[in-house]
Image (cartoon, rainbow, N blue to C red):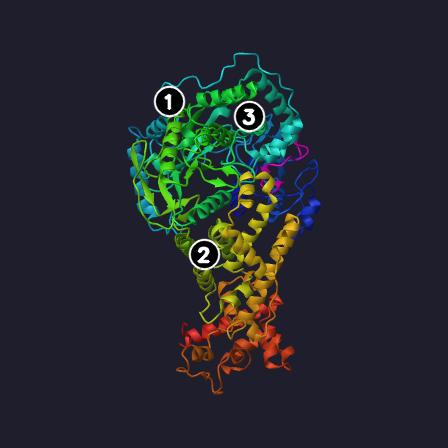
Amino acid sequence: MGIPRGFLLSCYLKYPNVPSITGGDFNARIASNREALIKSKWWVDPGAQTYDLVYIPTRISKDVKVNKAGVMLYQMALRLNLIILNGRCPPDIPGEFTHLGLKSNSVLDYVLVSRDLFLNVTSFKIDNAQFSDHLPLTTKLCVDWHLLVRSHPIPVIVEPSTKIKGIRWSPALAHRYMDFIREKFLGDQPDGRNTKYPLTVIPAPTWEQFLRKYFSVAEAPATRWRPSNPLPVWHNTDPAEILELIAELKTGKAPGPDLVPVEAIKLHSAWWAGILAKTFDAINATGLIPGTWKEAIIIPIYKKGSPGDPGNYRNISLLSSIGKIYARFLLARLMKWSAEADLIGHEQAGFRLNRSTTDQAIILYHLARKYSTPRRGQLCAAFIDLKAAFDSIPRQLLWDKLACWGIDRRLLWLISQLHAGSVARVRISPAGDLTNPVPVNKGVRQGCILAPLLFNLFISDMRNPLIDSQKFIHTPRIADYRCPLLLYADDAVLLSYSRVGLRRALKIFASYCHSNHLSINHTKSKVLIFSRSRKLYSWKLEGTKIEQVHKFKYLGIYFQYNLGWKEHVEYLQNKTKALSHSLLRFFYSEGALFIPAALKVYSIKVMATMAYAAPLWAAFANLSPLESLQSQFLRRLLKLPTCVSNAAIRLEMKIPSVELVLWRRVLIYWISLWHKLPNHYLIQCMWRDDFTNLWSGKIHAKLLSYEISPTELLKLDLNAAKRCINQRLDDVELYQNFLAGGGACSPLNLGITPIYRAPSYLTSLIAASHRYAFIRARFNVFPTNVLRHRFTKGQVPSMCACEMKTSESLHHVMFICPMYSLARASILNSIIQPMADKPVDLQLAWVLQDVDPYITLQVAKFLTAVLSYKRRNGMLTDY
């Protein structure tokens, strides 16, 4: 409010009698009555000034909150004799919200007019056109403009510009000016963020050519299904169903071509439900779908490689929000039919309820362990990579398959209508410039919620030729089920317990891909033989050689030929180390050295990366390298020396060990598998297979080590079992931390009682210097000669530099040393005097206990002053 307020004051002082209209986003909240403003802490009594409040209609507002900017705006309006139109003029008498937030709505935008112009206002309203999170404000005035100009002439305050002729603008000239501005004005500005993702620099024709190459067929056949018989009749759409679909929409997403954000729909969901129910009925009857529902705006996100190559971008499609609701409407009917038809096989786990990548990886591990355990046993696996599978399937073939399988013909007709005539445009600049629309007549729609299920249905017959030839291709068995392949969306794994069988399976799979217009990426497709032997063989697929490897990354997990986990743990080490270093760089540059935020990001990002698919590999792997990485990160974050034990850090910061996090994942996943057996056939087969898996044995042994009976655990319901596991693991971790975390350099050694939550000084101490000084004292590693004496193994004396000739311990620094008497008298004396008669150890533990934010702050200030004194006098040595 500072700049607008000063500007308006100067304008009104210069032109006091000129009628005026002022409007904009003031970021001000002024409630609905003057009493609320007067009661606020920001209200300034005008004193002897009196304001003319007569003849001003009472203002009404849905926003009942007040902020500082609101008080300033209101007092400025009184001083300048302005009237706020919000909530005073019809039809905005309720005082509608002008800003739609993620958590709440508010009134932040206002229009103010001078008092003599208020009578000319005929209407004021908040428009329901959501181009952004701020809604447009519209006001109408009835003014005799010519009379107003004669009575209040306004001087020209801006001289007319001289027109310059002969300017020729071109992209080349624009780039020259951009380079000039960057060099002259922006060159000296530091860029701490070190932007890694360049803006799109690819011209529109290149993008259009790229889209036509991969998403469009020049002479594509008709991609909409035409029914030959009358379609079945659908009942009218229930608005309650639309309400449920609206509730499922996720907020915080960018709007599509219709520029309607999800938040605007959810704000008045009941109104939208009635309108959309009638709209959907009309579409269901006629098949006429609005063009904006078929349009996609592609946002390219740079990945790696040359920024000038469109193939080096990940494309994010923005679709119409209302079109998404209709797609969900069709999806509900498609899912119901798909479940009844039971077309998608047990091998497919992608985009299915109660399925995960970990499930698929564990089934593969079980089969590999089962068939490679016997002497000379082996499991041959071919990991097949399909080129742009989602974007390349022929739509007409998809419609034909669905029609052949007996889908509701009206549903098929509407789905094909939604895909027919779809176009895509690429946003090529931050200003929102778009390419020309390019027809998309191949593949499922990017970003559409129907796409995953349609793709799963398209390849649901992939297993049929393999199942028909299961004896011929030597299909492995899990319990009584023959499993020739595993699928996770378009990630396919062909399985056979012999090399001959796998070669035959590859031929069958290649034939299926050819007939269904799917392309195989031979470079990325690999063969891995799980066995004790490292012998390599020659493999061909469609006449092209494919490589046999000893390790392969499948669904983010490195599988080795001998079923070891060394490669995967090393991969996690490198990835975790890179993420931790990136987080620390941000923490020390733009992160304001705020430890709680860094710990939260570490838990969400770094630890989640480390724990991915942990139920499979954590039971077998050596976790100590990952534990060391976490300890190194915490030490660098807290600036603690190696003499502080890992257990002491975890106990203080309430950070679980890597072993606890990973084993918690393993045990909870294991018990969850038991409870979802009825809904996952392959897991059922694995559970009752005659081969005893080593994975289950490891879990049983771990449960017994925690004194948990596996049999009794399986009798509990899922939530009770999870609580039992969590409680027991937390208790064991806490006990171990108490045992190992009580060394010389720990809060326990000082007599500080640990609490069962994160320490409050991490947030109450705002200055980073105060936090780090207090942390060092809490861990008994505050820079003293006693500490240096301990580190140098007696080579440095422990005596203090003061005249008292005594050891410079933390207690001596805090309460006795005369070198810090001035700082102690001004900061600490009022705190430590009540404790003067207490034992020395109790005094130190009390001031460092962090029970009172004021005491903690004063102690931190004193410790910071001590460090400053030591630094000025050359007494501070890094440890």
Residue 175 visible: yes
Kind of element beneath mark 2:
loop
Residue 732 falls in image quadrant: bottom right
As drawn, 1 above or below 866:
above
Say which mark, if any, is on residue 719: none
- Give the foreground label among 1 and 2: 2
Q: Is residue 119 left or right of residue 453?
A: right
Mark 2 and mark 3 in contact? Answer it, CB < 8 Å.
no
Earlier residue among tags 1 and 3: 3
Residue 305 falls in image quadrant: top left
In the rendered image, residue 16, in percent from the top left (x then y), is placed at 56, 39
Q: Is residue 313 left or right of residue 231?
A: left
Mark 1 and mark 2 in contact? Answer it, CB < 8 Å.
no
In the rendered image, residue 513, in percent from the top left (x then y), is placed at 39, 29
Which corner quadrant holds the C terminus? bottom left
In the rendered image, residue 10, in percent from the top left (x then y), is placed at 52, 43
As drawn, 61 above or below 37:
above
In the rendered image, residue 244, in percent from the top left (x then y), is placed at 63, 32
Kind of element beneath mark 3:
helix
Residue hosting label 2: 621
CA distance separating discs 1 and 3:
60 Å
CA distance separating discs 2 and 3:
83 Å
Q: Please tell me whether residue 17 belongs to the stretch shown in magenta.
A: no
Q: Amino acid at mark 1?
A: Val
Of the pair 566 and 299, the residue shown nearer to us:
566
Residue hosting label 1: 217
Residue hosting label 3: 145
Residue bounds of the magenta highlight: 88-105
